[in-house]
């Protein structure tokens, strides 16, 4: 896998987990404040699309993963 694929995998996983923890109808509901984390992940994806700067991707490249396309 390339670094950009792992970044999107992490983002998708974090969004799904935070929705599971933040939606009152969920069996693993903790607090609606978890929805703020969902918004943070979405905002980070938006800014990385516009600026092409993502801290996780930088870390993954330094760990030796192949860069994206």
Image (tube, rainbow, N blue to C red):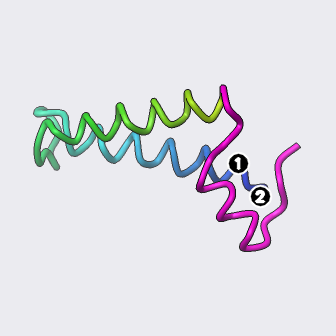
Describe residue 11's horizontal placement relative to residue 8 as left or right.
Answer: left
Horizontal placement of 42 versus 48: left or right? Answer: left
Residue at 70% x, 48% y is 5
View extreme (bottom): residue? 63
User: Is 62 drawn above or below residue 29 in the view shown?
Assistant: below
Image x and y of residue 26, in percent: 17, 39
* Part of the protein shown in magenta: 50-69
> Measuring 57% from the left and 30% from the top, which residue is drawn there?
47
| Secondary element at tag 1 | helix
Q: Are marks 2 and 1 in contact (CB under 8 Å)?
A: yes
Q: Is residue 49 above or below residue 68?
A: above
Quadrant housing the N terminus: bottom right
Rendered view: 52 above or below 61 = above
- For the residues labelled 2 and 1, the Cα–Cα distance comes to 6 Å
Magenta run includes residue 22 = no
Looking at the picture, how far across and down is residue 7, in whole percent?
A: 62, 49
Label at residue 1: 2
Residue at the right extreme of this rendering: 69
Q: Could you say which is closer to the camera, residue 50 or residue 17?
A: 50
Q: Is residue 55 magenta?
A: yes
Q: Quadrant of the C terminus?
A: top right
In the rendered image, which residue does mark 1 sit on?
Answer: 5
Mark count: 2
């Amino acid at each position: 896998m390339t670094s950009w694929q792992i970044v999107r995998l992490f983002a998708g996983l974090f969004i799904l987990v935070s929705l599971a923890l933040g939606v009152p109808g969920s069996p693993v509901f903790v607090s609606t404040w978890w929805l703020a984390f969902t918004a943070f992940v979405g905002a980070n994806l938006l800014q990385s699309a516009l600026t092409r700067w993502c801290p996780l991707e930088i870390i993954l490249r330094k760990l030796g993963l192949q860069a994206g396309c």
